Image (tube, rainbow, N blue to C red):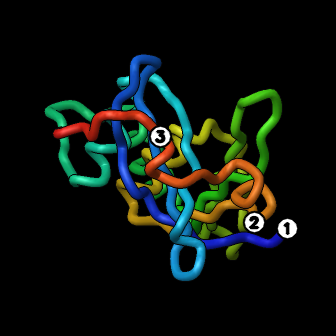
């Protein structure tokens, strides 16, 4: 699989929920990959981008804390497939107890992006997927979320 490095371009709102736009870095920055999720997931991603915390840990914060406590670290996340309008993601992490080992965890893109935004972990998109599903940002109708 050939991957392109990406970043979160925007988290906005539509009538159908939150819309996360992933933009390819460097020469792949004319398109975005739109990922629709529910408003709470969009808010979690936005909070991670802004490094906002809550009085109690959210699920994504707890996942990161557990990884750190057991000697692991997030390496990267990938958006690597789509079937019937549903995107698939993986979280790649390294564990360091008893020697280094890389693990791959199946994840919803919204969860993977919420974790990546908190950890500042690199985001990658399968190149073919980005070419097939990527669109011009001006072709989308959404409101930028203010928080």
Q: Nearer the viewer, residue 4 or 94?
A: 4
Q: Quadrant of the C terminus?
A: top left
The disc, 3 or 1, on the residue closer to the chain's N-terminal end is 1
Q: Spatial distance from mark 1 to mark 2, Cα to Cα?
A: 8 Å
Is residue 80 depicted above or below 17 in this figure? Answer: below
User: x, y (%) of residue 143?
Assistant: 29, 34
Q: Nearer the viewer, residue 79 or 129?
A: 129
Q: Quadrant of the N terminus?
A: bottom right
User: x, y (%) of residue 87?
Assistant: 69, 38
Q: Nearer the viewer, residue 56 or 88?
A: 88
Q: Residue furthest front?
A: 139
User: x, y (%) of residue 40?
Assistant: 36, 24
Q: Nearer the viewer, residue 80 or 66?
A: 80
Q: What residue is disc 2 on?
A: 127
Question: Can you see residue 53?
Answer: yes
The disc, 3 or 2, on the residue closer to the chain's N-terminal end is 2
Q: Residue furthest top?
A: 15
Q: Which mark is residue 140?
A: 3
Q: What residue is disc 1 on?
A: 1
Question: Can you see residue 66?
Answer: no
At a point 66% along the width and 61% down the height, the residue shown is 125
Labels 3 & 1 near each other (Cβ < 8 A): no
At a point 31% along the width and 49% down the height, the residue shown is 48
């Amino acid at each position: 699989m050939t991957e392109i490095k990406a970043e979160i371009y925007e988290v906005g709102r539509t009538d159908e929920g939150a819309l996360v736009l992933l933009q390819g870095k460097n020469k792949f920055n004319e398109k975005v990959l739109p990922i629709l999720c529910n408003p709470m997931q969009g808010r979690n991603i936005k909070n991670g981008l802004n490094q906002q915390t809550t009085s109690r840990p959210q699920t994504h914060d707890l996942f990161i804390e557990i990884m750190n406590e057991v000697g692991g670290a997030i390496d990267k996340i990938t958006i690597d497939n789509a079937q019937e309008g549903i995107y698939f993601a993986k979280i790649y992490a390294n564990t360091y107890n008893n020697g280094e080992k890389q693990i791959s965890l199946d994840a919803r893109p919204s969860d993977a992006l919420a974790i990546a935004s908190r950890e500042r972990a690199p985001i990658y998109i399968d190149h073919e997927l980005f070419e097939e599903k990527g669109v011009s940002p001006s072709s989308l109708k959404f409101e930028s979320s203010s928080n």
